[in-house]
Amino acid sequence: MKKYKDKNLPVRVRTEDLLSRMTIEEKIGQLNQLSAKLSDADEMRKNAAQGLVSSRVMASTAFAGNEEQEITGFDEINLLQELALNQSRLGIPLMDGWDIVHGQRTIFPLPLAQAAGWAPELVQRAAEIAALETAEWGVRWTFAPMLDIARDPRWGRIVEGFGEDPYLCAQMAAASVKGFQGESISDKRRIAACAKHYIGYGMSCGGRDYSACDCSEHELRNTYLPPFKAAVEAGAATVMASFNEIGGEPVTGNKHLLTDILKGELGFQGFVVTDY
């Protein structure tokens, strides 16, 4: 089976050719992200060899000093990648992702504290260091930056974001994306960023996590959208759809938000991943 070696071929050409040759099972497999922490290691290896998994989400277990290390460690990452590249029918590589929110081995202040410094250049530098340490471990994707505007102090995830001001959050969003990705995510010292949680997660009713949200189009565009616009303009490779619903419709199935605004108006060219 043909596996492309020529990296100069346009991505669209390779993508359309791959899609034309994929079975339904393989297409579903490329939409399948599994938890390394909750998955059987043998089953994961089998799926990788058959091209039935596209990536793993490993949260923060990478440096755990217990049996989880065997599932999420460097050797296992390399083994699964080898199986996907050399044994699967189409040789599509895996893309592991972690929550690298404020540092990997070197730990920096929480994003809310970073924002308090009003120093985007420091936020960018922190993301650069986190990217280097993550890439060296074999992981090339982070579920960050978190760009939710926080307006209710009862919401427990405020510390993960850059605060309540759309302008400040937008500046930090661009700095973080540039730090993680650099000039190109093909750089071995860089990783793909993921702007999350698109969108409106921080306005959850009563500060309850994963709760319903509701707001006008004006509020959505002027308060909650600017950080994501900045992230897209900075080149964010991926975006994470939020858990919540807005006006009774789940964001994960909202054509207006995901297709019309994100893809159409903002011109986002990457892919959208669901939340955990």
Image (cartoon, rainbow, N blue to C red):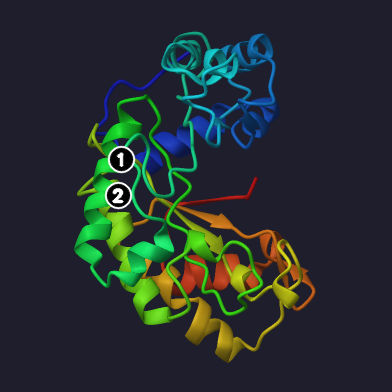
Where is residue 104? Give x, y as percent.
Answer: 37, 37
Question: What residue do we see at 59% from left, 32% from top?
Answer: 30
Question: What residue do we see at 55% from left, 54% from top?
Answer: 240
Where is residue 201? Give x, y as percent.
Answer: 62, 68
> Is residue 228 placed above or below 108 in the rendered structure?
below
Alpha-carbon neighbours of circle 1 within 10 Å: few (<14), some, or many (≥20)? many
Q: Amino acid at mark 1?
A: Ala
**From the viewer's perspective, is 189 left or right of 65?**
left
Alpha-carbon neighbours of circle 2 within 10 Å: few (<14), some, or many (≥20)? many
User: Circles 1 and 2: CB distance less than 8 Å?
Assistant: yes
- Label 1 and label 2: CA atoms lie apart by 6 Å
Instruction: Check the picture and name the quadrant holding the C terminus.
Output: top right
* Residue 232 visible in the shown view: no
Location of residue 51 by image quarter: top right
> Is residue 144 placed above or below 103 in the rendered structure?
below
State the SS at label 1: helix
Question: What residue do we see at 42% from left, 39% from top?
Answer: 141
Question: What residue do we see at 65% from left, 9% from top?
Answer: 42
Where is residue 145? Give x, y as percent.
Answer: 42, 56
Instruction: Please name the residue that numbered disc 2 is placed on.
Output: 127
**From the viewer's perspective, is 96 left or right of 132?**
right
Q: Amino acid at mark 2?
A: Ala
Instruction: Please name the residue that numbered disc 1 is placed on.
Output: 131
**From the viewer's perspective, is 207 left or right of 183?**
right
State the SS at label 2: helix
* Residue 189 visible in the shown view: yes
> Is residue 47 placed above or below 275 in the rendered structure?
above
> Is residue 158 placed above or below 7 in the rendered structure?
below
Location of residue 247 by image quarter: bottom right
Where is residue 211? Give x, y as percent.
Answer: 75, 67
**From the viewer's perspective, is 73 left or right of 209?**
left
